[in-house]
Image: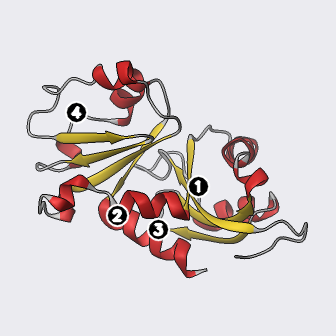
């Protein structure tokens, strides 16, 4: 485990930004994103693809502040707000190990994970409509939702907006290959 200048141990984490560099809007170059993270005191910063994935090291007290710190830096420099969800390398490993759709032999190309900022209540989870997007399936596991989109994510009605309206928290989706690549990057440090 890396140690920061403060002497506190630093652990690896993944930040997932929602809605940047999509359809030519809310442009945020990955180099600039990495610079913002580094300037805010986070170490070993790496980005992955243009959709807002950041792997970084930080001691625990700084990790809790990451969404607010990064969000404020993006707003100041780029003039738009970006929801940010963070998972530790250990949490991401549990997500990868516990995908119920893989145990059923479903093709990983049709799998996604919705990462939630906060765990929803049982009542909020019960408000998800199983008939909203016929054919799609989901399993809620604490702050993560495993998703199976057999017709593709673009055809699903289980969008971030829908999930957020029902679960009352920020969400951001990643396909299964991205989840595994981010885990690989987080473990490599």
Q: Quadrant of the N terminus?
A: bottom right
Upstream in the sequence, badge 3 or badge 1? 1
Label 3 – label 4 distance at C-alpha: 26 Å
Q: Nearer the viewer, mark 3 or mark 1?
A: 3
> Mark 1 falls on what kind of element?
loop
* Label of residue 157 in the image: 4
Quadrant housing residue 164:
top left
Upstream in the sequence, badge 1 or badge 4? 1
> Mark 4 falls on what kind of element?
loop
Upstream in the sequence, badge 2 or badge 1? 1
The local crowd at label 3, few if under 14, some if 14 to 19, many if 20 or more residues have their Cα within 10 Å, is many
Upstream in the sequence, badge 4 or badge 2? 2
Upstream in the sequence, badge 3 or badge 4? 4
> Mark 2 falls on what kind of element?
helix
* Label of residue 97 in the image: 2
Residue 108 % position (x, y) = 20, 64
Q: In this rendering, is residue 26 above or below 57? A: above
Label 2 – label 1 distance at C-alpha: 31 Å
Residue 175 % position (x, y) = 32, 58
Q: In this rendering, is residue 46 above or below 152? A: below
Q: Disc 2, disc 1: CB below 8 Å?
A: no
Label 3 – label 2 distance at C-alpha: 14 Å
Residue 152 % position (x, y) = 17, 50
Q: Nearer the viewer, mark 1 or mark 4?
A: 4
The residue lying at 36 percent from left, 30 percent from top is 163
Residue 121 horizontal side relative to residue 135, left or right? right
Name the residue beneath numbered marker 1.
Answer: 28
The residue lying at 42 percent from left, 59 percent from top is 94
Q: Nearer the viewer, mark 4 or mark 2?
A: 2
* Label of residue 182 in the image: 3
Q: Quadrant of the C terminus?
A: bottom right
């Amino acid at each position: 485990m890396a140690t920061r200048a403060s002497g506190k141990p630093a652990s690896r984490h993944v930040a997932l930004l929602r809605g940047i560099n999509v359809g030519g809007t809310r442009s945020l170059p990955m180099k600039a994103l990495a610079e913002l993270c580094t300037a805010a005191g986070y170490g070993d910063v790496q980005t992955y693809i243009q959709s807002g994935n950041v792997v970084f090291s930080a001691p625990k007290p700084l990790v809790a502040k990451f969404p607010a710190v990064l969000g404020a830096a993006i707003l100041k420099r780029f003039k738009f707000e970006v929801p940010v969800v963070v998972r530790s390398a250990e949490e991401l490993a549990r997500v990868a190990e516990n995908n119920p759709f893989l145990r059923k032999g479903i093709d990983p190309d049709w799998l996604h994970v919705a990462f939630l900022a906060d765990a929803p209540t049982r009542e909020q989870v019960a408000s998800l409509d199983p008939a909203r997007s016929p054919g799609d399936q989901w399993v809620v596991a604490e702050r993560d939702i495993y998703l199976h989109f057999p017709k593709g994510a673009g055809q699903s009605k289980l969008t971030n907006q829908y999930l957020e309206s029902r679960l009352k928290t920020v969400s951001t989706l990643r396909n299964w290959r991205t989840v595994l690549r981010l885990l690989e990057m987080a473990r490599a440090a």
